[in-house]
Image (cartoon, helix red, strand yellow):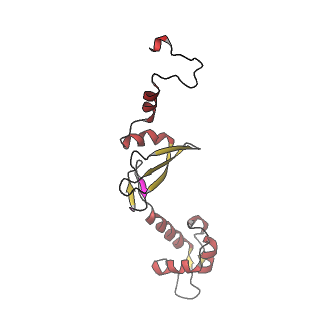
Amino acid sequence: MSSRNNPSRIKSHRNYTVIDISDTLGVHPKTVRNWLKVGLPIVDEKRPLLIHGADLKVYLKQKRKAIMFDCEDHEMCCFRCKQPMKPSIESVLFIAKPAGMAHMTGECEECGCRMNKYVSWRNVNDIWLELKGKLPIAEKHLILRGQNLLNCPFDGVFNDEK
């Protein structure tokens, strides 16, 4: 059974019974009855209870929107603090993923909870600067200064580099 209820599985111009909704979304019929108790509108009071597809779509979208956070690019959702938080700069890590995405991980500054977020690889430098971090490229060049490069076929350092 899925924990995310996909509203695109619901047809807008159709009426559904409780059992139809539970079969379509893969949830228990008791879950649908709980939705009815907390605000899912029904067509009329007659049995079997009928729910209009458009109303169900709107309800599922509002339910999903209520648990989402509006985060800035440099913030991640902390589920322990229940709000968008900045990660501590020491714990931030970017992992390259396919299709120009990066997996951003870090720990919450307040509670230390682990947080995750997917961002565009183009925005990584901007996010890093927003978090008041030094660019990792500059640190890499500082560390390698005066050392032989690993992919360099020569053993020594050139005379013009001294």
Q: In percent of the image, x 56 and y 26: which residue is there?
A: 150
Residue 78 drawn in magenta:
yes
- Place of residue 72 in the rendered image (x, y in percent of width and height, measured from the top left): 40, 50
* Segment tinted magenta in the rendering: 76-81
- Front one among 51 and 113: 113
- Place of residue 133 in the rendered image (x, y in percent of width and height, measured from the top left): 38, 40
Q: Quadrant of the N terminus?
A: bottom right
Q: In percent of the image, x 36 and y 53: which residue is there?
A: 109
Report the side of 15 relative to 38 (left or right).
Answer: right
Q: Outermost residue toward the bottom?
A: 46
Report the side of 37 relative to 109 (left or right).
Answer: right
Residue 126: image quadrant is: top left
Residue 99 position (above or below residue 25): above
Any part of residue 36 in sight: yes
- Place of residue 119 in the rendered image (x, y in percent of width and height, measured from the top left): 49, 47
Residue 18: image quadrant is: bottom right
Q: Outermost residue toward the front?
A: 155
Q: Quadrant of the C terminus?
A: top left
Q: In percent of the image, x 60 and y 19: which residue is there?
A: 153
Residue 70 position (above or below residue 74): below
Q: How many marks?
A: 0
Residue 73 drawn in magenta:
no
Residue 104 position (above or below residue 22): above
Residue 7 position (above or below residue 98): below
- Place of residue 64 in the rendered image (x, y in percent of width and height, measured from the top left): 49, 65
- Front one among 44 and 5: 5
Any part of residue 17 in sight: no
